Image (cartoon, rainbow, N blue to C red):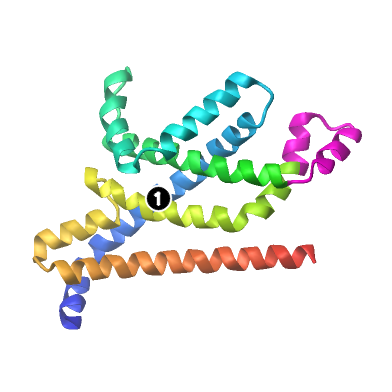
Amino acid sequence: MFETIYNILARYGGVYIEGLIGTLWLAAVTVVLGTLIGTLLAVMGLGRIKLLHAFVRFYVWILRGTPILLQLYFFWIFLPRVLPFELSDTACIVTALIVNASSYVSEIIRAGIQAVDRGQEEAARSLGLDGLKTMRYVVLPQAIKNILPALGNEFINMIKQVSLASVFFINELTTSYRTVLSATYRPVESILIAGAIYLFLTTVLTYIMDRFEMNLKRSEA
């Protein structure tokens, strides 16, 4: 088996590298935009405008209550039909991944904001900061510190969820496995290589997040 894995890597290593690059690209876009939208949703959900609050609750309820694969199919079918311009399959799937990620991130950040002592906000207001500056400079930095482990786990989970894009033949690591499988007819060895790359990637990112959290705690000491 090890010899077969070596031969597959020697011949199709470039295919796996292309898939890894695709996975990292999809994950980076999902993490960045999903976090930005999720933060905005969390702030909107905690605001005093009831209509926005209701919208955020409905948004989160729908996205967290339905399977992500179903959401990918929905965006893949729905967006090209309603938009006045042509949209690629990749754009549809990336949009679905971002929307799904934003719902989970919003709940994590909302919990972090609510965990911040209300006295911090009152003190900031007494110093003359308005609501937006208080949220940006006082509440959110403390909330991020509180939720960093949960947020890091969600980021890693996003990376694994990107593999669902292979259902739509988007270029990423699981798609590379399927390409190599069709060429070699060696399912076990092909999937072991893809699994090892995923495991290495998530292990490295987990280590980075742990180190970042430790350094953050040391800076506060």
Res. 11 in view:
no
Residue 125 falls inside the magenta stretch: yes
205 or 64, which lies in front?
Answer: 64
The number of callouts visible is 1
Q: Residue drawn 55% across and 66% down?
A: 208
Res. 113 in view:
yes
Q: Is residue 50 left or right of residue 200?
A: right
Residue identifier under label 1: 25
Q: Quadrant of the C terminus?
A: bottom right
Residue 145: % across, % down: 68, 54
Q: Is residue 43 left or right of residue 55?
A: right
- State the residue lying farthest toward the right: 127
Q: Residue drawn 37% across and 55% down?
A: 160
Question: Compared with residue 102, is residue 44 higher up or lower down, i.e. above or below?
Answer: above
Residue 177: % across, % down: 21, 60
Q: Amino acid at mark 1?
A: Trp
Residue 103: % across, % down: 49, 38
Residue 13 falls inside the magenta stretch: no
Dot 1: element: helix
Question: Compared with residue 17, is residue 92 higher up or lower down, i.e. above or below?
Answer: above
191 or 19, which lies in front?
Answer: 191
Q: Quadrant of residue 97?
A: top left
Q: Is residue 15 left or right of residue 205?
A: left
Q: Quadrant of residue 119?
A: top right
194 or 100, which lies in front?
Answer: 100
Residue 79: % across, % down: 31, 26
Question: Compared with residue 44, is residue 18 higher up or lower down, i.e. above or below?
Answer: below
Q: Residues within 10 Å of mark 1 (few under 14, many from 20)?
A: some
Q: Residue drawn 84% across and 33% down?
A: 129
SS majority, magenta: helix
Boundaries of the magenta span: 116-138
